[in-house]
Amino acid sequence: MRVAASGGWQSLWLLLAVVCLLGLPVLVHAQTDDDGFRTVVAEFANANFREKESIAGRLIDTGHGSAGTVLTALRDGRFFFRQEDQQAFIVESIDESLSVYALVDPVSLEEAGSAEPDELSRVITNNRLRRFLRIAIARFSLSSPDSDIRIDAVKQMLRSLDAASIELLRERAGEETNSSVSYEIDTALALGALDEENESSTRLAAIDTLADRLHPEVHNRLSAILERNEDGSFIEGDEDVRRAAAEVVRGIDAARAFYAVLETVFFGLSLGSVLALAAIGLTITFGVMGVINLAHGELLMLGAYTTYVVQLAMPNHLDLSILVAIPAAFVVAGTAGVLIERTIIRFLYGRPLETLLATFGVSLVLQQFVRSVFSANNRPVVTPTWMSGTLQFNEAFSLTYNRIYIVFFTLVVFAILLMVLKRTRVGLQMRAVSQNRLMARAMGVRSEWVDAMTFGLGAGIAGVAGVALSQLTNVGPNLGQSYIIDSFLVVVFGGVGNIWGTLIGGMSLGIVTKTLEPFAGAVLGKILVLVAVILFMQLRPRGLFPQTGRAADDV
Amino acid sequence: MKFKHACFIVCLAAGLALPATAGAQDPIKVGVLHSLSGSMAISETTLKDTILMMIDEQNKKGGLLGRQLEAVVVDPASDWPLFAEMARSLLESEQVDVVFGCWTSVSRKSVLPVFEELNGLLFYPVQYEGEESSKNVIYTGAAPNQQAIPAIDYLMEEVGIERWVLEGTDYVYPRTTNRILEAYLKQKGVAEEDISINYTPFSHSDWQTRVAAIRRFGSAGKATAVVSTINGDANVPFYLELANQEVSAEDIPVIAFSVGEEELSGLDTTPLVGHLAAWNYFQSISSPVNTEFIETWKEFVGDADRTTNDPMEAHFIGFNLWVQAVEKAGSTDVDQVLAALPGIETPNLTGGVARLLANHHITKPVFIGEVRANGQFDVVWQTDGTVPGDAWSDYLPVSEDTIGDWVTRKCGNYNTKTNVCSGQNFQ
């Protein structure tokens, strides 16, 4: 700029001439490149999956600047041919709601008009092709400004390393500034350096680098070093290399075993918190009031359906809808609970068998109610983005966010319930009525009102639990039935009427179930847990935390 | 007196007319034995509606043998013993000429003795585990060689799968299918340690441990796939857990034999995209017959969002086979219809032809579809032409020499080595 401004026209012309001289061949070259690229792209029209894979490979080989974009569009199902002239196009967005697709030329990446979905035929991909594309696209995203994308790209490339990708990674390693990305690149390069053609010392150094990696690729590659040929001789000739590899493999195995235990404990806790959450409401109605409420499962179901309805009501704020659903579900299920108590259960106090039958009837009515209103089909409840995905600690250990949230959610619900029971007036009255109804009445407690509130509270908490369940299982008319047995099991095991018992009981049943499952399988595991609980109940008929004192004698 | 006289004439006329009209107008009774309540209602109600639609269409065309068709619908309520009772009442008190019904294998097994004892005729429209060929049942759903085996072939040859997880719900269909698949995989040279078989209870909802195990099994460096015979309710939590643990369809594809358009319409399909299903029909397959069928169906149920699925196509084929057999036999008598049925051909909905074979199974094309975000399937593979249904699997030692042949040998369980017909022969 400075030259042009101060040196006058002469220098400007000179500059232009130089640019032209240098630029022209480039332009001509680009022209032929474009044509070649377009020809290759056109081959996708009538290719099978294997051919598409090789076409994609050739697209990358052209080195054309649009290759990455075309392959990404192909992977995402946004690559089309126009039926009338077999022209290839990329479509920016294939959202269901669009009636017209905006077209982009795959070579120039410029806008190229629009077309109706019916006029286009999509290039179909299959799993194998998409896996290939994912790894291929990773090469283009190595220089992405986002370090997370770069890490992901390197991890993809780790899965199938060849000379070209190792070369790319080596180039990247020189300019990479982010330490996490560098760490992954080192892993990849070390894996590449294990190649048999390299010197033993190079390979030993590579194994040394890999010593603290837990990647499955590292484990597999090093295990391969330890294998023998068919004649019994080792594939790897160098004993030092073998010894070093064996040590690393042992280390990975040990780490994996350790993390597997942690994982099982977490799975147990998360299953336990689901069980406890589903059962807490029951503890209140069953434990405090002595009502065997077989409609408890359907109150869970109402909560789950409330989540669905709330989600329908706020389609543009799906991530928030679940937070709105929590109080809404509490109100809906709680109201249903109060209604059930006022219209049916209050006439049946002291007659457990009739309560049992009546609530069973209520459960059928509620099931049929949602069948009539929402149809017998399950309803789709979308998982909010902040609840999906995993929290990855390392290559061998990661926990899913939705389970982490549910464990915390259970603890929060539990804490709030304890607060209500211990710190509020209603809670005090509830405890008073559950300990000695007559005495409480004599003290001026309106026991009928307290009964309704207690049942409403239990039902409301069931509704809140239903919100959590909507994230884990089918939202359908049968949702309640799958949890009612487990809920009773937890309540009885934990000790009737004891909220701590429910929490501890749920958690321990969860952990025991999950510990047994890998060895015994899910079916036998469930049987074993049931047998264990029955035996336990023989020893301690009142569960883990039995009620003591005079209240216990009344139950 | 006059009044009495009039009555006499009217009564006489009525008495004369009644038998005559009954002879010409008496409708042909079609029994529909599908659960309309309980856990299976979600799948079976659709099939009841399909048969009602087919009957409706047939009556618009003038009925059958000059008589109208009349549906007798009962609700066995997803209760297996009730299926047998309802079947008995359909055949004995309602005297139906044919029954379309059942979904689960256990319900079919429960009505089988009733149909054989009372010589009824049942059209069974759902893919099943095979190892059966009854004189009184026409199997219009897929046998394992028309669904499971081609699915394995696709994964092995086209996707390059080397390691297999056979994941199923713990009951007869998954257990038998997995036994066949295990034998088939081993025959194809897959090593014992590359096959993992697991069963979970009905409505299993906590899949954390299983999915973690599948992930670990799949991280051994060999391409891994899950062959799922997981039933109904347990599917959604399974796919959700796969998505949550970030197991993508590209890394470990899941191929399912009981997840179709109907099931997908009830859930958020995002976690399923890219996973596979093997069926003999997909709604997305374009053919003139299919387009017409879908239109008629949407009009019949009055809902433009309703989907069609594979068992519906089976009922479509089964109903047309029966209509043609009745026309050929000139009667609705079960024995005559059964004699007329083998060899009859009728168009299927995907542009091919279904032929009823001597073993009471039909020929079907096999399609592999990938789930799309809109709940429909992309067909990624299909067999050349149709595959004849094999009642007795060639891959199980107990049944490799057994065939069903109701035309020449009059036997559903004929051993071609020993030339002995064992069981299921009521001649």
Image (cartoon, coloured by chain):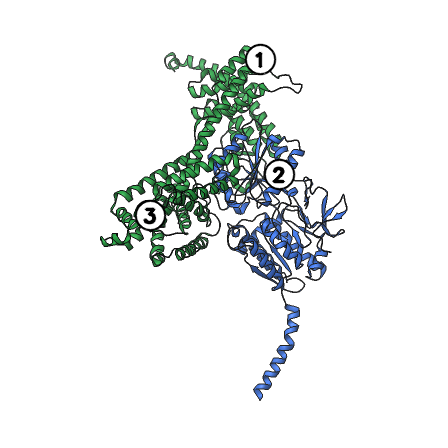
The amino acid type of the residue labelled 3 equals: Ala
Q: CA distance from mark 1 to mark 3?
A: 71 Å
* Residue picked out by circle 1: A239
Chain coloured green in this rendering: A
In the rendered image, residue B113, in percent from the top left (x then y), is placed at 64, 55
In the rendered image, residue A437, in percent from the top left (x then y), is placed at 28, 53
In the rendered image, residue A168, in percent from the top left (x then y), is placed at 51, 19
Q: CA distance from mark 1 to mark 2?
A: 44 Å
* Residue picked out by circle 2: B151
Q: Which label sits on residue A552?
A: 3
Position of B62 with respect to A460 (left or right) is right
Is A14 placed above or below A59 here? above
Residue B388 or A256: which is nearer the viewer?
A: A256
Position of A239 with respect to B117 (left or right) is left
Q: Give residue A505's quadrant in the image.
A: top left
Chain coloured blue in this rendering: B
Element on which disc 1 rests: helix
> Outermost residue, left direction?
A443
Marks 2/3 in contact by CB < 8 Å: the verdict is: no
